[in-house]
Amino acid sequence: MARGRTSIIFKGGEHNGLEYHDVALPLPNRIRYSKGVCFAGSLEKDDIQIIKFSEKLPNNWISYSVDVYVKEEKENKRKLGSIYKYKGEEMVNRCEATTQKGTLCKHNALDNDIYCGAHKKIISK
């Protein structure tokens, strides 16, 4: 494998045994793998649907589920590849701020918050 590239292997969860090769370094410590299902609709109208998506979230998404994998430390530093172990499922929520155009912000809310990083800074002022 080329220098600066590696392989990753997922252990546990829905993606157990899945491998990706020729992945660019450096690797993150956590990978959040989308489950392809989201809640969409309008909270104000009490009209929520569960929607499957493949690559792009629908415009009216509210939250979606991800599998979380955490990089394991290698015992043998010379061994090629990295293993990511399943740690559980998390919900990713949409930022609840309204943009200047009057539409809902399209970014993910920060963990344990209702706003994304940009809107958190604006609202905190």
Image (cartoon, rainbow, N blue to C red):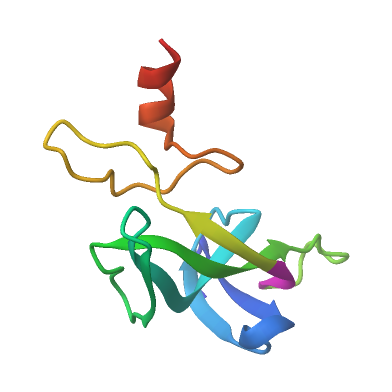
Relative vertical location of residue 23 with respect to residue 20 in this rendering, above or below:
above
Q: Is residue 76 visible?
A: yes
Q: Residue furthest bottom?
A: 17
The range drawn in magenta is 81-88
Q: Is residue 2 visible?
A: no
Q: Position of residue 53 (x, y in %)?
A: 34, 80
Q: Main secondary structure of the magenta part?
A: strand
> Nearest the camera: 3 or 109?
109
Q: Is residue 68 left or right of residue 103?
A: right
Q: How many marks?
A: 0
Q: Residue at x 26, y 37 (%)?
A: 98
Q: Residue at x 75, y 72 (%)?
A: 79
Relative vertical location of residue 1 with respect to residue 19 in this rendering, above or below:
above
Q: Position of residue 109 (x, y in %)?
A: 46, 44
Q: Position of residue 38 (x, y in %)?
A: 42, 72
Q: Residue furthest left?
A: 101
Relative vertical location of residue 98 with respect to residue 55 in this rendering, above or below:
above
Q: Residue at x 31, y 59 (%)?
A: 45
Q: Is residue 85 one of those drawn in magenta?
A: yes
Q: Is residue 104 one of those drawn in magenta?
A: no
Q: Residue at x 43, y 26 (%)?
A: 120
> Nearest the camera: 83 or 43?
43
> Nearest the camera: 72 or 65?
65
The quarter in which the C terminus is drawn is top left
Please tell me in which quadrant of the rendered image residue 87 appears: bottom right
Relative vertical location of residue 22 with respect to residue 14 in this rendering, above or below:
above
Q: Position of residue 88 (x, y in %)?
A: 72, 69
Q: Residue furthest front?
A: 45
Q: Is residue 82 left or right of residue 31?
A: right
Please tell me in which quadrant of the rendered image residue 75 appears: bottom right
Q: Is residue 7 left or right of residue 101?
A: right
